[in-house]
């Protein structure tokens, strides 16, 4: 088998590394690499062990079924701990198929073909052929598929997996390479801005604050969008991040209501559910402990909507620890109620007293034949509320004047007592129900009942009807479609011209816009918009777009089916717009 020496052309004559080629057959040429004696000597000085095999296959040129070039990436840096070993571990080769060159016959042929390697691949064997370091992440990502041993940069095949070969479309590889370059350039630019801001604030603002105000790096639009789209797990956010997110929503709430009403409504519902779940968990935790009245009063004070649920009609809290037997509600008088509330519409007052879950509802021993009388703490609490009611009605006029609070009335003051736990024993439960049913002026509830009301509310909010869920989704999708149609309109730029002194207007497409495709997309969006309008009215059929012939509409017959298929259609339109108008973002600001 004839051997053709290629010579030592690494660094164009500056290295003594050696390449040789071997003609395996008329359709296959192999190129082998041998490091220079200097490299081997340096490796012996630096590394614990010098490679036993110092001649390895580097390239393979073939024309078996079309021309191809296969690279066997090697670590050729003598100080590398894996000197002369495969550069990417399990990934043995990178093949370019097809390769638009004939089989090399001379040294210059080999070098010429190395120079023709696509951008992103190293072209100098002394650095180790393969992908350039900036794009090594592409190989590292593919390596996560355990069965892959070979990468094929394919010019006419879509990206796919076939056995131990990963086919990466060459256009996609180039797109990835350019994207990595953009990210790198962006990070370098942002780093330069940060350094400039740091230097300016340290050297100028700290020394001459009256002349040089402290500056901050300008916020870059879409930063938060990109973070959310990356689906960063919420638990990875710091406490400061979460607080800032809440503050941002608070500051932007009016704009959100105008631009994204459906999303804002969904956020409100989700927050209510999360808050209610947290309250229930805290309520259950407190029930398992022995706590004093003040701790329970604090819970109700922080969550006054619980009082709404107990009454079953809308109430407003006026004060906690209100003085109802003196001259003002705030600070004088000996009779104090835990909470003073009023009916939201009639202003009629109600009094709230809160004891603890451990307070006994009934006496320990039966009064007679399975009947139990109420415990002294319960009787005392009811008497206390009745006394508060008496004092309040007697002093209401002076309280209103002294407190300057005239929107309260004492037409029929209600009293509420929250106390104890629901009895489990049937006789005790019967006695309790008989007693509280005849408590005319003071309603008595147990802590168990309050907790059950909270859970019932949670179930109601969680199990929203399919109709409500569908309507919410319909609103979200229609909002996205309207934004798309707005983008379509910005693909055109207006201009005017005169004919015989008469001014005429004309619309022209921005440069780079695929006009034919954009027109098709606008037609589909128009049909889909009609579908949304009919879906809101509940009048089928609901158009989704046109069929392949473009002559007939594709319809859904139910709102549920329309919403499901419309989501896919909107996503497709969003993607297609970017393809038809690649530079659209620069015109949308």
Image (cartoon, grey):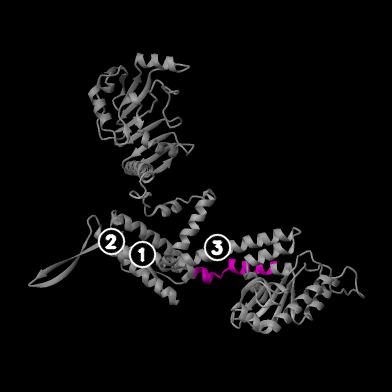
Mark 3 in CB contact with mark 1 (< 8 angstroms): no
Depth-wise, is mark 3 or mark 1 nearer the camera? 3
* Residue nearest the observer in this picture, 541 or 266: 266
Instruction: From the top left corner, tell me how far across and down residue 444 is, in percent.
Output: 75, 74
**First in sequence: mark 3 vs mark 2:** 3
* Residue nearest the observer in this picture, 517 or 476: 476
Q: Residue furthest left?
A: 500
User: Which quadrant would the C terminus be assigned to in this image?
Assistant: bottom left
For the residues labelled 3 and 2, the Cα–Cα distance comes to: 40 Å
User: Which quadrant would the N terminus be assigned to in this image?
Assistant: top left
Examine the rendering and report whether any part of residue 560 can be seen.
no
User: How many circles with numbers are drawn on the protein?
Assistant: 3
Q: Which residue is mark 3?
A: 271
**Image point (56%, 70%), residue name:** 465
Q: Is residue 219 left or right of residue 502?
A: right
User: For the magenta stretch, what is the residue range?
Assistant: 451-470
Q: Find residue 538 and name its label.
A: none
**Image point (66%, 64%), residue name:** 299
Q: Residue furthest right?
A: 368
Depth-wise, is mark 2 or mark 1 nearer the camera? 1
Q: Residues within 10 Å of mark 2 (few under 14, many from 20)?
A: many
Q: Residues within 10 Å of mark 3 (few under 14, many from 20)?
A: few
Q: Which residue is mark 1?
A: 483
Q: Taking 69 as reference, is 234 above or below it?
A: below
Mark 2 in CB contact with mark 1 (< 8 angstroms): no
For the residues labelled 2 and 1, the Cα–Cα distance comes to: 15 Å
Instruction: From the top left corner, tell me how far across and down residue 114 is, in percent.
Output: 28, 29
Q: Which element carries disc 2, helix, strand or loop?
A: helix
Q: Which residue is mark 2?
A: 518
């Amino acid at each position: 088998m004839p051997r053709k020496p290629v010579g030592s052309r690494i660094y164009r004559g500056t290295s003594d590394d050696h390449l040789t080629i071997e003609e395996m057959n008329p359709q296959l040429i192999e190129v082998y690499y041998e490091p220079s004696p200097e490299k081997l000597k340096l490796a012996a000085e630096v590394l614990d062990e010098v490679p036993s095999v110092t001649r390895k296959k580097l390239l393979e040129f073939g024309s078996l079924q079309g021309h191809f070039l296969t690279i066997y990436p090697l670590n050729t840096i003598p100080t590398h701990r894996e000197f002369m070993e495969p550069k990417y571990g399990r990934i043995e080769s990178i093949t370019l198929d097809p390769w638009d060159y004939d089989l090399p016959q001379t040294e210059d042929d080999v070098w010429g073909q190395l120079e023709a390697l696509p951008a992103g691949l190293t072209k100098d064997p002394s650095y180790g052929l393969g992908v350039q370091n900036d794009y090594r992440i592409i190989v590292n990502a593919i390596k996560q598929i355990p069965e892959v041993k070979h990468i094929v940069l394919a010019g006419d095949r879509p990206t796919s997996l076939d056995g131990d070969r990963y086919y990466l479309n060459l256009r996609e590889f180039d797109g990835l390479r350019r994207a990595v370059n953009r990210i790198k350039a962006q990070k370098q630019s942002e780093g330069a801005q940060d350094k400039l801001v740091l230097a300016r604030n340290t050297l100028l603002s700290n020394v001459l604050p009256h002349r040089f105000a402290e500056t901050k790096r300008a916020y870059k639009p879409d930063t938060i969008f990109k973070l959310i789209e990356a689906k960063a797990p919420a638990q990875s956010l710091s406490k400061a991040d979460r607080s800032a997110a809440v503050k941002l929503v608070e500051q932007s709430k009016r704009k959100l209501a105008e631009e994204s009403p459906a999303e804002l409504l969904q956020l409100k519902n989700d927050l209510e559910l999360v808050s209610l779940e947290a309250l229930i968990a805290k309520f259950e935790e407190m029930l398992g402990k022995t706590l004093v009245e003040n701790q329970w009063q604090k819970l109700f004070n922080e969550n006054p909507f619980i009082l709404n649920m107990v009454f079953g009609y809308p109430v407003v809290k006026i004060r906690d620890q209100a003085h109802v037997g003196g001259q003002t509600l705030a600070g004088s008088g000996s009779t104090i109620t835990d909470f003073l509330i009023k009916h939201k519409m009639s202003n009629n007052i109600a009094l709230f007293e809160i004891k603890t879950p451990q307070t006994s509802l009934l006496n320990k021993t039966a009064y007679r034949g399975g009947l139990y009388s109420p415990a002294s703490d319960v009787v005392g609490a009811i008497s206390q509320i009745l006394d508060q009611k008496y004092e309040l009605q007697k002093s209401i006029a002076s309280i209103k004047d002294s407190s300057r609070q005239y929107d309260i009335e004492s037409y029929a003051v209600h009293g509420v007592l929250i106390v104890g736990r629901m009895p489990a024993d049937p006789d005790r439960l019967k006695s309790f129900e008989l007693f509280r049913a005849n408590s005319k002026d003071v309603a008595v509830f147990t802590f168990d009942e309050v907790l059950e009301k909270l859970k019932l509310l949670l179930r109601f909010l969680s199990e929203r009807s399919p109709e409500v869920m569908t309507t919410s989704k319909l609103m979200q999708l229609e909002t996205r479609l309207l934004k798309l149609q707005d983008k379509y309109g910005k693909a055109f730029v207006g201009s005017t011209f005169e004919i015989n002194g008469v001014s005429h207007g004309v619309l022209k497409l921005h440069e780079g816009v695929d006009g034919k495709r954009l027109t098709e997309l606008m037609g589909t969006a128009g049909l889909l918009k009609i579908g949304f309008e009919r879906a809101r009215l509940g009048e089928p059929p609901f158009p989704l777009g046109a069929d392949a012939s473009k002559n007939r509409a594709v319809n859904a017959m139910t709102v549920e089916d329309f919403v499901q298929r419309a989501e896919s259609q909107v996503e497709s339109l969003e993607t297609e717009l970017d393809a038809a108008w690649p530079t659209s973002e620069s015109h949308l600001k």
